[in-house]
Image (cartoon, helix red, strand yellow):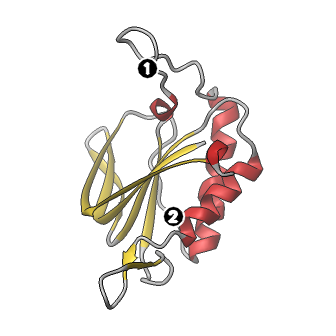
Amino acid sequence: MRAVVQRVLEAAVAIDGVETARIGHGFLVLLGVAQGDTTEEAEWLAAKIARMRIFADEESAMNRSVVDVGGEALVVSQFTLQASTRRGNRPSFTAAARPEEAMPLYETFVERLGTEIGRKVPTGRFGADMQVSLVNDGPVTIVIDSRLKE
């Protein structure tokens, strides 16, 4: 499971030109589920992200989590995070989990993240063509792969 975590001043998702989710200060998480990913990985990743200290403290050091700053989170599914670009110029997405495998893990991740940060986590719509907008704060962008946790 791969996540791209972006610290944002605001972020939003639109589907067919209609805004479906919006947050203020916090982070946008783009989440890609791979074949063979597990519930344990989804729960580990959600907890890791909730506790990640990427927000500034009084001395401008990145020393606070999204919970510490009362921030929000928005999660968007993005199977293209599992792309392989090893051969040729056209990415291969064969490592991405099929929707029937990915959707329950995506939902587990969102639910666990909400529990960890103590608030409802808005999302995009799984499998939809979405337009995601954000104002990246910093910019701060972190990539986490659950298979590289050790």
Q: Name the residue under label 1.
A: 85
Q: Which of marks 1 and 2 is in front?
A: 1
Q: In this view, does 20 lie above or below 105?
A: below
Percent position of residue 10, x then y = 28, 65
Give, as a three-letter code, the residue at label 1: Thr
Q: In this view, does 147 lie above or below 73?
A: above
Most foreground residue, 87 or 99: 87
Determine which quarter of the picture holds residue 62.
bottom left
Q: Relative to 94, is 136 on the left or the right? A: left
Give, as a three-letter code, the residue at label 2: Val
Q: Relative to 33, is 16 on the left or the right? A: left
Q: Which residue is drawn at 38% across and 33% down?
A: 129
Percent position of residue 49, x then y = 54, 63
Q: Name the residue under label 2.
A: 121
User: CB atoms at circles 1 and 2 under 8 Å apart?
Assistant: no
Q: Relative to 3, is 141 on the left or the right? A: left
Instruction: Say which element carries label 2.
Output: loop
Q: How far apart are marks 1 and 2 (CA)?
A: 31 Å
Please rate how many residues cluster around mark 2, counting C-alpha atoms within 10 Å: few if below 14, some from 14 to 19, many from 20. some
Q: Which residue is drawn at 45% across and 10% down?
A: 87
Instruction: Say which element carries label 1.
Output: loop
Q: Which residue is drawn at 51% across and 64% down?
A: 121
